[in-house]
Amino acid sequence: MQKISSWRYLAVNRKTLLAALACGLVFSMLGCGAFKGSTNHLQSVTLGASLVNGVPPTGQAGFFDLRGDGGTIQLMATANYTNGTAVLLHGSEVIYTVIIDPNHTMDAYGNALLPPCYGPCPQNGTQGTVEISPTGLVTAVEPATCTWVDPVPLPGTASWFFVGAYQVTVSYQGITSQPVYIPVASSAGDQFYPALINGQPDTDPANENNPSAACGQSSS
């Protein structure tokens, strides 16, 4: 029987050990098969929220209401792989994008929503209401506003709809998530609907449908 020299034995086992350690470090994200030519790869990225004002959200996941001046929504990005693995995403490769929802651009007072800010908003009135951090933390900032209206008032019941919202997506390794919508309730609501008549503020008492000036579905 041919003997294996001790230095070759150690080198082979060291190589095997390093390969096993490398596989173990990435197993939770990709699986060891990724290093053996498997077809496992990033399939999609999904966007949700882990906390709304410090509390895990419940109910509908397509939008998250940003309530209160200084209110926060912590967004959560998840990478979904073809082997069924789902991994929470962090780091500089995760890029959040927020815009004004093209279909809902106004507040309850008939004003156009301000463009959002990436990081602290400038104090010149050109941006505001919403800012987002690189880690996906959305914060309600000045100027505060309300994007909810009650267009079909019924006694004792509010039928809330949002007329303005911000649209957020997240991108990772070239794949972009589905959009999430963020209406805003950081100020009091409008007492009148519609907010404008012929371009002028509506002050007709007959159109008053929100005498408490509440804003949004949890304020009815």
Image (cartoon, rainbow, N blue to C red):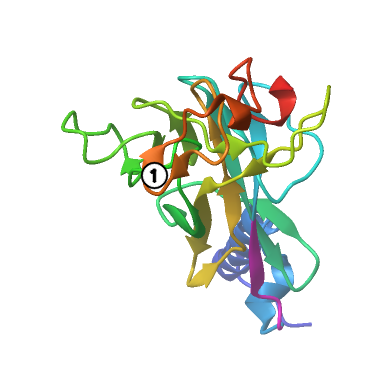
Q: Amino acid at mark 1?
A: Leu
Give the x, y percent position of residue 94.
Answer: 47, 54
Q: Is residue 217 above or below residue 118?
A: above
Give the x, y percent position of residue 77.
Answer: 60, 50
Q: Is residue 66 above or below residue 11?
A: above
Which residue is drawn at the image coordinates 46% and 20% (left, top)?
Answer: 70
Q: Quadrant of the C terminus?
A: top right
Q: Nearer the viewer, residue 157 or 42?
A: 157
Q: Is residue 47 magenta?
A: no
Q: Is residue 189 above or below residue 13?
A: above
What residue did someone put label 1 on?
A: 113
Residue 5 is drawn in which quadrant?
Answer: bottom right
Q: Is residue 120 visible?
A: yes
Residue 121 is drawn in which quadrant?
Answer: top left
Q: Which residues are magenta?
A: 39-46
Secondary structure type for disc 1: loop
Residue 29 is drawn in which quadrant?
Answer: bottom right
Q: Is residue 40 magenta?
A: yes
Tell me: 12 left or right of 170: right
Q: Residues within 10 Å of mark 1 (few under 14, many from 20)?
A: many
Q: Nearer the viewer, residue 201 or 53?
A: 201
Give the x, y percent position of residue 192.
Answer: 55, 31
Q: Is residue 133 visible?
A: no
Tell me: 66 left or right of 161: left
Extreme residue in the left direction: 124
Which residue is drawn at the image coordinates 46% and 34% (left, top)?
Answer: 202
